[in-house]
Structure formats: C-alpha cells, structure tokens
C-alpha cells in the first residue's frame, strides 16, 4: 500500500470521502447541510491542491476509488512564548472508506501529513478526533491539550 499526494484527478473521490466523513459526524446538533457544498469544495481543491498551505494524501482502493485520505492545512498564527514559528497545522479531514477500515491506512496517511508539515516548517499540529480515532492519534504523539469549543453564526 502506497500513500501518495492527491492529484486533481482525485477530487471527485476526495469529495465522496469528505461526504462520508460528515455523514458520520452528523448528529442532532449538526443539521443537514443547507447548501450544496460539493462544488465549492471541488473548486477550492483545484485552486489549492499542491500548494504549501494544503496537504492532501491518499491511498488508492480498487476500481479507481480511494480507500482513504487525509487533508491538512497550514495556518499562520502569531508567535508565542512557546513557539517562535507562527505556522501551525490543522488536520481537517481523515477518512477511510468503510470497506478499507482497520488496515492501517489512517496511520500511514498521518505519517505522510506529519512529514509534510515538518518539511513546511510547521512545528505544531492540531486535530479534532472521534472517540474511536483518538487512540491512534495519541499513539502517534498527539496529546490532550485544551478543551475545544466551537461557535457557529446563527
């Protein structure tokens, strides 16, 4: 199994996997999407894929499908007493197609993302994890840091 950077040709599959992710995360506090997000997601991917601010890594599945993907972004933040480099990473989408779960793809993709962050001088990476995925990330050096709160505009 080989982890590789995503290409423009992967965008339809990245969209499919992203939809799987949000279906899994949906609950009573998160209503069904009120707008067609897919077109905007695909436009943004086409514009940003391959740049220094968006890292997308995939594992191929069967018959032209992707088995898994991981999406990370680089954000500029102000320097702190603990980190002079103002670059921070955020992993905003790790998803494995249900048919391919349990085969280590997420770990392999996360290793590639962390190497990509290091190559781009990012020393701090954050993510939100489901309870099922948290042990994987902890085993890779992530630790509980702060309580994450989210505000959504009405």
Image (cartoon, grey):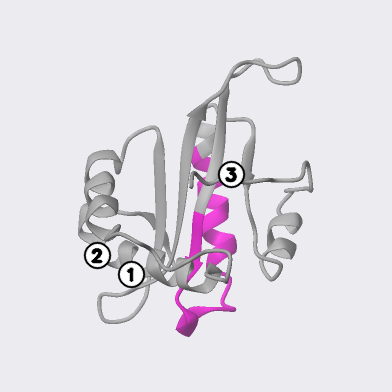
The residue located at (30%, 75%) in the rendering is 65
Q: Residues within 10 Å of mark 2 (few under 14, many from 20)?
A: some
Disc 2 is placed on an element classified as: helix
x and y percent of residue 54 in the render?
39, 40
**CB atoms of marks 1 and 2 within 8 Å:** yes
Is the Cβ of the residue at disc 1 closer than 8 Å to that at disc 3?
no
Secondary structure under the numbered disc 1 in the rendered image: helix
Residue 61 shown left or right of residue 105 in the figure: left
Which is nearer the eye, 23 or 64? 23
Quarter of the picture holding the N terminus: bottom left
Residue under pointer 1: 16
Q: Main secondary structure of the magenta part?
A: helix
Which residue lies at the image location 46% right of the left edge and 72% below the top edge? 23
Rendered location of residue 80, percent (x, y): 70, 17
* Residue topped by disc 2: 12
Q: Quadrant of residue 88?
A: top right
**Residue named by callout 3:** 151
> Is residue 39 placed above or below 50 in the rendered structure?
below
Dot label at residue 152? none
Name the image quarter holding residue 67: bottom left
Q: Nearer the viewer, mark 1 or mark 3?
A: 3
Callout 3: helix, strand or loop? loop
> In this picture, is 43 found above or below 103?
above
State the extent of the magenta-drawn residues as a range.
Answer: 93-116
Residue 92 horizontal/vertical position (percent): 50, 50
């Amino acid at each position: 199994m080989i982890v590789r950077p995503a290409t423009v040709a992967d965008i339809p599959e990245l969209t499919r996997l992203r939809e799987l992710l949000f279906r899994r995360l949906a609950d009573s506090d998160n209503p069904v999407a009120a707008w067609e997000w897919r077109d905007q997601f695909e436009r943004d991917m086409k514009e940003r894929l391959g740049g220094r601010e968006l890292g997308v890594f995939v594992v191929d599945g069967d018959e032209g499908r992707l088995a898994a993907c991981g999406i990370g972004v680089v954000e500029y933040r102000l320097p702190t007493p603990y980190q002079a480099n103002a670059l921070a990473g955020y992993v905003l989408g790790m998803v494995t197609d249900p048919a391919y779960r349990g085969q280590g793809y997420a770990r392999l993709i996360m290793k590639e993302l962390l190497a990509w962050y290091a190559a781009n001088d990012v020393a701090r990476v954050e993510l939100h994890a489901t309870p099922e995925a948290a042990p994987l990330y902890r085993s890779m050096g992530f630790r509980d840091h702060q309580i994450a709160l989210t505000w959504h505009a009405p």
